[in-house]
Structure formats: structure tokens, C-alpha cells
Image: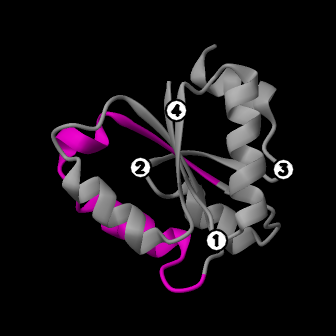
Amino acid sequence: MEFIIIDDSTFDLFTQEKLLLKSGLARTVTAFNSAQTAIEFLRKRVNTLPETVMLLDIQMPGINGFEFADRYAELPDSLRKRIRLFMISSTVDIEDIEQVKSNPNVIELLSKPLEIPVLRALLGH
């Protein structure tokens, strides 16, 4: 399975990538420390991106996870149908949690640190 991780934390990008690869869930992991760069990447791959799982951090400088989700919603349906979008955060803020739950493009809010058994269950593996 292909994965994209978007997180401004170099440590979180590194650990999540290693966890995903070691678990066998991920065949490849593409990591971005900027939501803007990730959106640009997706726009260029509209017709070529394979089935992908995306892990999106909420709290980031510049474009945060919610702003990314708004831009993501504007991408073509054909692309979004190939992406399973999860937000990932250590937030306990009720407003953040409710905002994630109300977004139809987001499957689930995952807690940091990433728990592979939880993700595996959500993906049906």
C-alpha cells in the first residue's frame, strides 16, 4: 500500500515512516513537512496517483491540516476516490475533534503516536 504523510515534525515523519514500513502496511511512504508542497504534489499526480492512504497532521505552520482538507476537497473526485484520508494529532481540543468528525473527506482522527494495530483495523488488514 502507498502512504503519504504530511507533518511539520521531522521526528514524527521519520518515526511514522519507519513504523509503516516495518509493519508491512506500507510498500512506499512519501513524506511532506509542508501541506502546501503536498497539495502541489497531488495536483501533479491527479491521473497517476495509485490507491493511497494519507496521514495528515492537524497543527502545522502555514497551511494547517484543516486548511489542507479544504484545498483537498477542491481536488478532482477521481483523485480523492483513490485516497483514504486520516488526520493524526495529539490534540484533545474538542473543537478540533468535532471539526475532524464533521469533514466528509476524513475517515478518522488517529492519535499520536501512531498505533499500527488501530490503523490496520481501520484499513481492514
**Do the residues under discs 1 and 4 have CB atoms within 8 angstroms?**
no
Upstream in sequence: badge 3 or badge 4: 4
When the figure is inspected, residue 43 is found, relative to residue 16, above or below; the finding is below
Camera-side mark, 1 or 3: 1
Q: Residue under label 2, please give it.
A: 105
Q: CA distance from mark 1 to mark 3?
A: 14 Å
Residue shown at the point (66%, 70%) measured from the top left:
96
Rendered view: 14 above or below 37: above
Q: Is residue 69 something that shows in the picture?
A: yes
Q: Amino acid at mark 4?
A: Thr
Query: Does the rendering let one see residue 89?
Result: no
The image quarter containing residue 84 is top left
Marked residue nearer the N-terminal end (4 or 2): 4
* Residue type, mark 1 in image: Asp
x, y percentage for residue 74? Answer: 23, 62
Mark closest to the chain's N terminus, 1 or 4: 1
What amino acid is labelled 3 in the image?
Answer: Pro
Q: Which region shows up in magenta?
A: 61-87
Q: Amino acid at mark 2?
A: Asn
6 vs 122, nearest the viewer: 6
Disc 1 crowd, CA 10 A, few/some/many (<14, 14-19, 20+): many
